[in-house]
Amino acid sequence: AQTVTQSQPEMSVQEAETVTLSCTYDTSESNYYLFWYKQPPSRQMILVIRQEAYKQQNATENRFSVNFQKAAKSFSLKISDSQLGDTAMYFCAFMKPLNTGTASKLTFGTGTRLQVTL
Amino acid sequence: DTEVTQTPKHLVMGMTNKKSLKCEQHMGHRAMYWYKQKAKKPPELMFVYSYEKLSINESVPSRFSPECPNSSLLNLHLHALQPEDSALYLCASSRRSLAGGPTGELFFGEGSRLTVL
């Protein structure tokens, strides 16, 4: 079974600064996907960034980028130029493609609560 | 329309009540999910429907009964719940990739917050 570990329950960063959230995972699979999801207070969870394990290049989405170290099974999220709207719970997630075709089964980490302050 | 709509947003029920949670999406997604989320915890998968057929049941107690009447709707019927079932219930949907497999991108609703007295 896959496990996803987020060792930082809470983090704080000042507006405009950079912060890195850590995530490690354990799997024997060679083909898989990794994600960071964001859940703002009282709002729905949304996908922040996605990484395919077979791609060596780190994924980037505007101010969000990842550092994917496959051998170390590490997948950290860097948020640059932090904004107040980045305040949220961030979940790292692992997915192994299912045989059901279209469906995805995600294994979530325990989450990191990020507070962006003025 | 990129929304997953869940109703009701809040529900309080007694242990002998029967109620239902409803989820709707019009994005053409053929996979739909129910998750349970306790405070400050990650979502826990309950059920997965793929092409309106139940494909995953994560050993959920029978007091939770899912139903997918069509490709846009997903219901969760609740009966004889326990206080420990109080939680945020999240619905999600996902689409296929161009290659036909899953993308891993789930579109979540805002959730239905359930309190069982």
Image (cartoon, coloured by chain):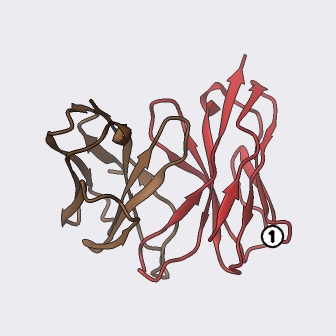
Chain colours: A red, B brown
Q: Count residues near mark 1 (Cα–Cα under 10 Å), then give few for <14, some for 14-19, many for 20+.
A: some
Q: Amino acid at mark 1?
A: Lys
Residue at 32%, 59% (x, y): give it.
B27
Image-quadrant location for residue B52: bottom left
Q: Quadrant of residue A101?
A: bottom left
Using residue A58 as the reference point, say whether residue B73 is left or right of it.
left
Left or right for B53, reference A16: left
Residue at left 78%, top 48%? A22
**Residue pointed to by mark 1:** A70
Residue A85 shown left or right of residue A23 in the figure = left
Q: Secondary structure at mark 1?
A: loop
Position of residue A64 measured from the top left corner of the image (x, y, whole percent): 71, 47
B35, B117: nearer the viewer: B117
Residue B110 appears anywhere in the view: no
Task: State which quarter of the image contains the C terminus of chain B.
Answer: top left
Above or below residue A90? Residue B56 is below
A88 lies left or right of B93: right
Q: Does residue A21 appear anywhere in the picture?
A: yes
Give x and y (percent) for residue B53: 26, 74
Compare residues B102 and B38 and report the one nearer the observer. B38
The image position of residue A103, as x and y in percent, is 42, 71
The foreground one among B89 and A69 is B89
Q: Which residue sits at x=45%, y=40%? A: A44
Q: Is residue A99 above or below residue A4?
A: below
